[in-house]
Structure formats: structure tokens, C-alpha cells
Image: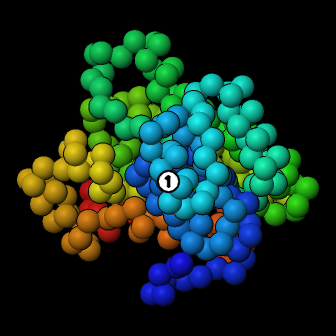
């Protein structure tokens, strides 16, 4: 059931939704929120431990897939189409913000970071576009990051990939808009997932971060997921090629 304090979108009921990286964190919450709207949801992830748990909890279809393997990715999306139908919503969520020093990066690691954080977004969009074109409707939502916007250091391959999401979003919006397919970007700030809490959310770091936000509370996965819902629903039918920052009004 949806939370009665928040919106229910009739246009999402029964709509086929594909989410990448849906086994944990923001992605898992996005899966939960779409399932609560009555959407027919599939999610892809390489996490064989958490994926089945989210699927059992929500009723969504989980397909284990390494998104860096494009043939496997294409096969997984083909399975989604076979079992649920053509996705009319794609949420390109999967990413991994591993820290790394500039001096440690070798070409193979750079390429792997691009494959983890950027390349699959294009190939997912490529795979779902024919079905959206045939339906003359669709919404593709790419997940960006404020990290590059704020000039964050300590992970240059990640921030480079995330900055490229802006260009990919605008290019796809232009290429697909003629078929009434909307492409937009959601840009989360520091979202306090279990991973973030475990690895980096020291009391000192959290206090400093929240003091720089206009709204002095933690940004949580449902805050991001509800923006994604709006962009997927027909309520945003004329919105394309835009980005929406969900960060509590962080002052850089």
C-alpha cells in the first residue's frame, strides 16, 4: 500500500517499470515505491543475496545481471519484455561510488568505472527505446550525483562518469522526444543508505553536512524515490531534458 501522506499516480498502475541496481539502497526503495503504486516492476542487479529478498518483499521480478556485461544486459531486458511486456519506464539507477586516488588509477580500472557508472545507462535506453517508440510514450530517468557539481575529490573516475549523465540525458531527450519519450535526470545529494551510514557517515561528517543544507535533516531513499515516481507518471508529461536535485538545498 502507498503511504496516505503522499501521492498515488493512477497512470503508474499496471505500467511496466525497469529499475537497474534495485537490490539495495536507493534502487531498492525505488522498486518498493513503484510496486506500491501497482506498477509491474522488474529490477536488475548482480547482488544475488539481496536481490531475492527485495523481490520477495515487493513482488517485483528480479533478474541477476552484471550490467557491465552488455550481452547479458540485453538478454536480461529481453527476459523482462517476455515476462512483463515492454517497459514504459526505465530508471537507470545502478552505480557505485567507490573512493580512489588519482595516482592509483590504471586504464583497466578507469574503463571498469565507466562500465559500472555510465555505459549501461546508454545500452539500457537503447534496449527499451523500440517498445517505447511503438507505444508513443515512455519515461527514462537517469540517476546523477551532486558529487561532481560540488567539486568533490577522492573519486575522479566516478565523478567523471556522473558528470557525463547530464550530457547523455540531454542527448537522449532530443533523440527520443519526437516519439513522446521523456528523458530526465534525478541528482541525489548525500543520501543516507545503509552503505553510506556504514562507510562514511561519521558523526562529525554528518553534522557538517547537515549544517550546509537549507533543510537540516538527512536525505533518505524515499525522498529520492518520490521524485522518480513523479517523473515516471503522466503528471510530468511535458517535462524533458531536465535535472532535479534532491539534496536538502545543500550550499556548496
Q: Residue at x 54, y 40 (%)?
A: 45
Q: Which of 6 and 120 is in front in this view?
A: 6
x then y, percent, for residue 150: 32, 49
Q: Nearer the viewer, residue 178 or 19?
A: 19
x then y, percent, for residue 187: 46, 56
Q: In this view, does 23 lie above or below 154?
A: below
Q: Which of 53 and 47 is in front in this view?
A: 53
Q: Which quadrant holds the N terminus?
A: bottom right
Reading the image, the residue beneath label 1 is 54
Q: Is residue 92 found left or right of 137 in the rendered image? A: left
Q: Colour scheme of this structure image? A: rainbow
Q: Residue at x 73, y 60 (%)?
A: 16
Q: Can residue 152 be seen in this view?
A: yes
Q: Which quadrant holds the C terminus?
A: bottom left
Label 1 sits on a secondary structure element that is: helix
Q: Which of 94 and 238 is in front in this view?
A: 94
x then y, percent, for residue 99: 29, 31
Q: Which residue is drawn at 30% across and 46% down?
A: 195
Q: Quadrant of residue 60?
A: bottom right
Q: In this view, does 26 lie above or below 118?
A: below
Amino acid at each position: 500500500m502507498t503511504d496516505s501522506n503522499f501521492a498515488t499516480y493512477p497512470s503508474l498502475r499496471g505500467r511496466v517499470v525497469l529499475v537497474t541496481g534495485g537490490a539495495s539502497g536507493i534502487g531498492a526503495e525505488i522498486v518498493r515505491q513503484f510496486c506500491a503504486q501497482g506498477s509491474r516492476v522488474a529490477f536488475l542487479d548482480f547482488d544475488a543475496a539481496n536481490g531475492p529478498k527485495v523481490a520477495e518483499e515487493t513482488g517485483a521480478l528480479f533478474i541477476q545481471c552484471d550490467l557491465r556485461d552488455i550481452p547479458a544486459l540485453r538478454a536480461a531486458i529481453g527476459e523482462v519484455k517476455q515476462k512483463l511486456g515492454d517497459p514504459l519506464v526505465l530508471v537507470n539507477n545502478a552505480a557505485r561510488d567507490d573512493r580512489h586516488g588519482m595516482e592509483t588509477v590504471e586504464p583497466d580500472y578507469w574503463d571498469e568505472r565507466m562500465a559500472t557508472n555510465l555505459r549501461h545507462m546508454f545500452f539500457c535506453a537503447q534496449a527499451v527505446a523500440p517498445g517505447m517508440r511503438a507505444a508513443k510514450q515512455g519515461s527514462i530517468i537517469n540517476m546523477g550525483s551532486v558529487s561532481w557539481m560540488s567539486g568533490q575529490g577522492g573519486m575522479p573516475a566516478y565523478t567523471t562518469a556522473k558528470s557525463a549523465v547530464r550530457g547523455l540525458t540531454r542527448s537522449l531527450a532530443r533523440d527520443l522526444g519526437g516519439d513522446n519519450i521523456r528523458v530526465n535526470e534525478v541528482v541525489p545529494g548525500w543520501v543516507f543508505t545503509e552503505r553510506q551510514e556504514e562507510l562514511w557517515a561519521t558523526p562529525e561528517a554528518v553534522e557538517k553536512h547537515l549544517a550546509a543544507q537549507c533543510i537540516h535533516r538527512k536525505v533518505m531513499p524515499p525522498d529520492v524515490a518520490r521524485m522518480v515516481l513523479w517523473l515516471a507518471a503522466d503528471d510530468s508529461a511535458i517535462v524533458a531534458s531536465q535535472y532535479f536535485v534532491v539534496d536538502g538545498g545543500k550550499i556548496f
